[in-house]
Amino acid sequence: MASADQLQFQEFDEAEDLLATTPNATTKSVSEEARPQHATLQMGGDSDGEEGETDQTELLAPQKKTSGFWTFQYYQDLFDVDTSQVLDRIRASFIPMPGRNFVRYHLRNNPDLYGPFWICATLVITVTVVGNLATFIQMHGKPDYNYSPQFHKVTVAGIVIYSYAWLVPLALWGFLQWRKGVSSGVSTYSFMETVCVYGYSLSAYIPSTVLCVVPYEIFRWIILLVAMCLSGFVLIFAFWPHVRRDNKMVAIGTLASIALLHVLLAVGCKEYFFWRVEEQPAAPVTTTPKAHITTQKM
């Protein structure tokens, strides 16, 4: 009992000294300090707020890539993608839908270079191999035809396709960056997101070029035009939200330039790799009349 009384008096003394220095301070008894403290955890309070995010806030979400542009980790992260993500993005490039932005719904601020690199590499192989095979099928059996593989077309296809998948996005990204500073209503993607959109948009050309082995000119034009439209709609639906608030002529000119370059790629590949073999008219055969020699009997 004596120790308890001494402890209580000591507590009163400390409280008196504390109130003397800070009159507004609150005191806590020793018994209260000895009680275990309980922490409360609130769960499920932010789910409604996350579901109510607008498209703009998700599009402008911070990038996951934090490494510097010149570091190896930056490029390693661009190839850190699983098979399900790549397949989902390829399927989305085959079925473009209005109102479903390819970047917002499928890239989600996580662009990759794995898919675009292998899509371009596969397209280079298919367009050259199938192009050579289609020419061989058309010319096979002709007496004046000697088959020789055209390996130089691999170099031409590689330069054209990879230039289109890198230089055109670079020019478009730079133009939108400039327009972003001129007009407040213009926005843009990052450079890697722009490259990613262009790379995945070429996936529709792979099966169409394989089908071009069929030696029918009208069929080739149809399947290449279908692939061109599917691929072009991916680009139009992705970049239209960024330029629609710009000057009307500039917005239309930007989309027209995107579509024109896309058409030139498709038509150029058709005319160069799957050119129509013209039937050469047969040369007329000229016959010389035989000389008749008559002999007279002597």
Image: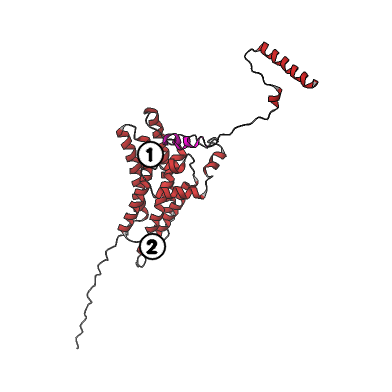
Q: Is residue 160 visible?
A: no
| Residue 55 among those drawn in magenta | yes
The C terminus is located in which quarter? Answer: bottom left
Q: Residue furthest right?
A: 2
Segment colored magenta:
44-61
The residue positioned 71% from the left and 23% from the top of the image is 30
Where on the picture, by quarter, is residue 185?
Answer: top left
The residue positioned 32% from the left and 58% from the top of the image is 219
The residue to which callout 1 is attached is 239
Q: Amino acid at mark 2?
A: Phe
Horizontal and vertical percent position of residue 135: 37, 60
Q: Secondary structure at mark 2?
A: helix
Horizontal and vertical percent position of residue 237: 37, 42
Pick the residue in front: 13 or 103.
13
Where on the picture, by quarter, is residue 100?
Answer: top left
Q: Is residue 203 above or below residue 9?
A: below
Q: Earlier along the polypeptide chain: callout 2 or callout 1?
A: 2
Image colouring = secondary structure
Pick the residue in front: 252 or 283.
252
Horizontal and vertical percent position of residue 113: 49, 44
Q: Is residue 41 above or below residue 199?
A: above
Q: Is residue 155 above or below residue 252?
A: below
Pick the residue in front: 255 or 140.
255
Q: Looking at the image, is mark 2 or mark 1 nearer the viewer? A: 1
The residue to which callout 2 is attached is 136
Q: Secondary structure at mark 1?
A: helix
| Residue 14 among those drawn in magenta | no
**Cα separation between marks 2 and 1:** 41 Å
Q: Residue furthest bottom?
A: 298
Horizontal and vertical percent position of residue 131: 39, 57
Q: Is residue 129 above or below residue 93?
A: below
The residue positioned 38% from the left and 43% from the top of the image is 235
